[in-house]
Image (spheres, rainbow, N blue to C red):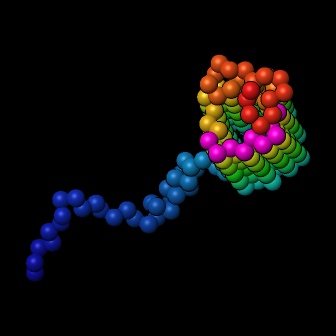
Amino acid sequence: MVPLVRHPFYIRPVPRLALLLLLPLLLGALPARAACNDTPAPGVDFRRCLLDERDLTGADLAGAVLRDASLIRARLPGAKLAGAEAAQARFVSADLTGADLAGASLLGADLTRAVLLRARLTGADLRRAKLFRTDLTGADLSGANLLGADLSYAILDGARWTDGTRICAPGSVGACQ
C-alpha cells in the first residue's frame, strides 16, 4: 500500500454539519436589504424601489443605495442624502429643497423638473444626469461633476458654480452666466 502524501497547503475539509451551523452567522454578517416600505435610515438599501410621491421630508438617507429607484414627485425637503448612491434614480418633479446631496452619485439620474432650491450638491457626481427644467436656485454645485449633464432650461439663479467661487447671475437659465 502506497502512503498518502498530503500537499503542504492541504486544508482539511470542514464537516457539512459545521457549515450548516455557521451559515446563519455568515449570512447575518452581510448587509441586509431593506424592504421598500421600511423606515428610511442612513445606509438603507432602497435599490429599485418605487418610492413615488412618498413624503421623506428631513429623512436621513446618508449613504443610502437608491440605484434605479423611482422617487417621482417625492417630497424630500431637508433630506440628508450625502454620499448616497443614486445612479439612474428617477427624481422627476421631486421636491429636494434644502436637501444635502454632497458627494452623492447621481450618475445618469433623472432630475427633470425637480426643485433643488438651496440644495447642497458639493462634490456630487451628476455625469449624464437629466436636469431639464430643474430649479437649482441658490444651490451649491462646488466640485460637482456635470460632464454630459443636460441643463436645458435649468434655473441657476444664485447657484454657486462647480468652480466653487462663481455665483450664477439672476436670469441664468441652462448655463451659469
Nearest the viewer among 7 and 161 is: 161
What residue range appears in magenta? 147-155
Compared to 37, does 103 lie above or below?
above
Quadrant hosting residue 39: top right
Compared to 141, does 68 lie above or below?
below
Q: Residue at x 72, y 45 (%)?
A: 150
Extreme residue toward the bottom, this view: 1
Answer yes or no: is residue 57 visible: yes
Answer yes or no: is residue 56 visible: no
Extreme residue toward the left, this view: 2
Extreme residue toward the top, this view: 165
- Residue 8 image point, x, y percent: 18, 59
Is 57 left or right of 176, judged from the image as shown?
A: right
Give the number of marks.
0
Q: Residue at x 11, y 73 (%)?
A: 3
- Residue 28 image point, x, y percent: 58, 50
- Residue 70 image point, x, y percent: 79, 51
Quadrant hosting residue 169: top right
Nearest the viewer among 56 and 34 is: 56
Nearest the viewer among 86 and 129 is: 129
Quadrant occupied by the C terminus: top right
Quadrant occupied by the N terminus: bottom left
- Residue 53 image point, x, y percent: 89, 46
Q: Residue at x 14, y 68 (%)?
A: 5
Is 25 left or right of 55, judged from the image as shown?
A: left
Q: Residue at x 62, y 41 (%)?
A: 147
Is 41 left or right of 135, judged from the image as shown?
A: left
- Overall secondary structure of the magenta stretch? loop
Q: Is residue 64 magenta?
A: no
Nearest the viewer among 146 and 53 is: 146
